[in-house]
Image (spheres, rainbow, N blue to C red):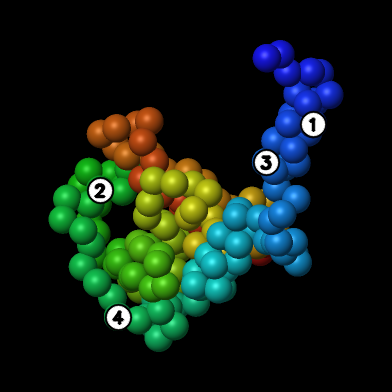
């Protein structure tokens, strides 16, 4: 028994309609995953740029207690004989940062946001490239110069 073309055509059309997704419920507005992730970081992150013009004591009041630097921590910018007595670690809202400050004036010099994913760090620290009040610079590990240690955030001082 030989099927005719009309029957094959009808079966083919029914198969296409059955698999087309037209029977799926229509959702109102779907938020794309990257936008949803960015909103999550923004709501749980830390506005690091607002900490740049504070003293180390004011930073501590804003983000919580100072913690000891991680064992074996080495800032690649520091010279080998420089002491780490003017650097402290803070952890707040998913952000781990090392604050460098002037011991005499207590003023924050820069903040080093620790982590290996630049985009995630930018979101969690609520930073923007090209901001007028600060610079964001990548910092690479001293022993592995192709691996990111974190992002250094430096205030831009316009003292003329």
- Mark 1 lies on residue: 10
4 or 1: tag closer to the N-terminus: 1
Residue lying at 39% horizontally and 41% vertically, measured from the top left: 148
Sequence-first tag of 2 and 3: 3
Secondary structure, mark 4, is: loop
Asked if disc 4 and disc 1 are in contact, CB closer than 8 Å, the reply is no
Q: Nearer the viewer, mark 2 or mark 3?
A: 3
User: Circle 4 sits on which residue?
Assistant: 65
Residue 43: image location, x then y, percent: 55, 73
Which quadrant of the view contains residue 70?
A: bottom left
**Residue 19 has which mark?**
3
Furthest-front residue in this view: 1
The residue sitting at 54% across, 67% down in the picture is 40
Residue shown at 54%/55% (left/top)?
122
Near mark 2 (Cα within 10 A), the count class, few <14, some 14-19 or many ≥20, is: some
Residue at numbered disc 2: 74
Distance of label 4 from label 1 (alpha carbons) = 72 Å
Badge 3 element: loop
């Amino acid at each position: 028994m030989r099927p005719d073309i009309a029957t094959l055509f009808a079966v083919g059309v029914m198969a296409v309609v059955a698999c087309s997704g037209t029977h799926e419920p229509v959702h109102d507005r779907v938020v794309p995953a990257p936008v949803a992730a960015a909103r999550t970081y923004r709501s749980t992150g830390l506005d690091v740029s607002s900490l740049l013009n504070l003293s180390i004591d004011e930073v501590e009041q804003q983000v919580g207690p100072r913690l000891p630097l991680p064992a074996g921590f080495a800032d690649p910018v520091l010279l080998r004989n420089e002491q780490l007595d003017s650097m402290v670690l803070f952890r707040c809202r998913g952000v781990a940062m090392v604050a460098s400050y002037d011991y005499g004036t207590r003023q924050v010099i820069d903040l080093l946001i620790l982590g290996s994913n630049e985009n995630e760090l930018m979101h969690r620290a609520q930073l923007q490239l090209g901001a007028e009040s600060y610079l964001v610079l990548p910092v690479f590990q001293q022993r592995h110069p192709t691996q990111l240690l974190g992002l250094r955030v430096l205030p831009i001082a316009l003292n003329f």
